[in-house]
Image (cartoon, grey):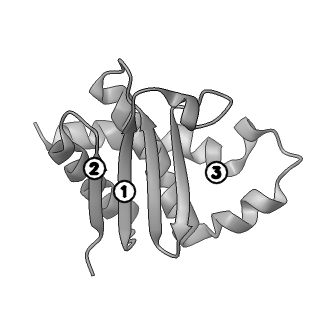
Amino acid sequence: MFTQIDAVGFNDPTLISTFIKFLCKELQINPKTITVESMHNNVYLSTDRSLGLCIDIEHEEFLIMVYEGNRNITEICNTIAHEMIHVKQYLKENLNHWISTCGEVPYSKRWWEVEARSDSPDLVKKFAESIK
């Protein structure tokens, strides 16, 4: 089974789709669907002005919303990689369970956020090197 990828609202949806395929391979995941949607203002993402959001819509079906605004492609890809790490965490590490049981831990210190912040820049760098 191949992941169905939809990149909506981006200047270069082909690049975004190629990046998502790369991330699926690197993270060793194969969800049914991933829809990545560009948001030009981030009021829809959260009250803390997040740059991205990963929503587990249904089993193996995900929506990733990314604030594009005036950010460059590296910043946008870093946010996508961050959210794709969350997809991996949902699929392989039962993130839904951990989200509901870690209320007392400050958000920035939750293991899934620490991992996504630390691993996403290396994934973007590896992708950039692969397309040179």
Residue 102 place in picture, x, y as percent? 82, 54
Q: Quadrant of residue 131?
A: top left
- Give the residue pinned by disc 1: 35
The amino acid at mark 3 is Trp
C-alpha distance separating marks 2 and 3: 24 Å
- Report, in whole angstroms, how far the alpha carbon at label 1 lies from the one at label 3: 21 Å
**Numbered disc 1: secondary structure:** strand
The residue type indicated by label 2 comes to Ala
Q: Nearer the viewer, residue 25 or 104?
A: 104
What is the spatial separation of the Cα atoms under label 1 and label 2, in whole angstroms? 6 Å
Q: Residue 74: x percent and y percent?
A: 31, 28
Residue that protrudes farthest toward the left in the picture: 132
Residue shown at 47%/73% (left/top)? 60
- Are the two marked residues, 1 and 2, in contact with CB atoms closer than 8 angstroms? no
Please name the residue that numbered disc 3 is placed on.
112
Tell me residue 5's x, y (percent): 28, 61
On the image, the x and y values in percent for residue 34 come to 37, 61
In terms of sequence position, does the residue under pointer 1 or pointer 2 come before the other? 2
Which residue, given by chain and number where applicable, does mark 2 sit on? 7
Front residue (pair 28, 30): 30
Q: Earlier in the sequence, mark 2 or mark 3?
A: 2
All told, the count of numbered labels is 3
Kind of residue sitting beneath label 1 = Thr
Q: Is residue 88 left or right of residue 5?
A: right
Of 34 and 79, nearer the camera is 34
- The residue mark sitting in front, 2 or 3, is 2
**Quadrant housing residue 44:** top right
Dot 2 falls on a residue whose secondary structure is strand
Provide the secondary structure element on which disc 3 rests.
helix
The answer to whether residue 15 is left or right of residue 57 is left
Residue lying at the far top in this picture: please name it.
70
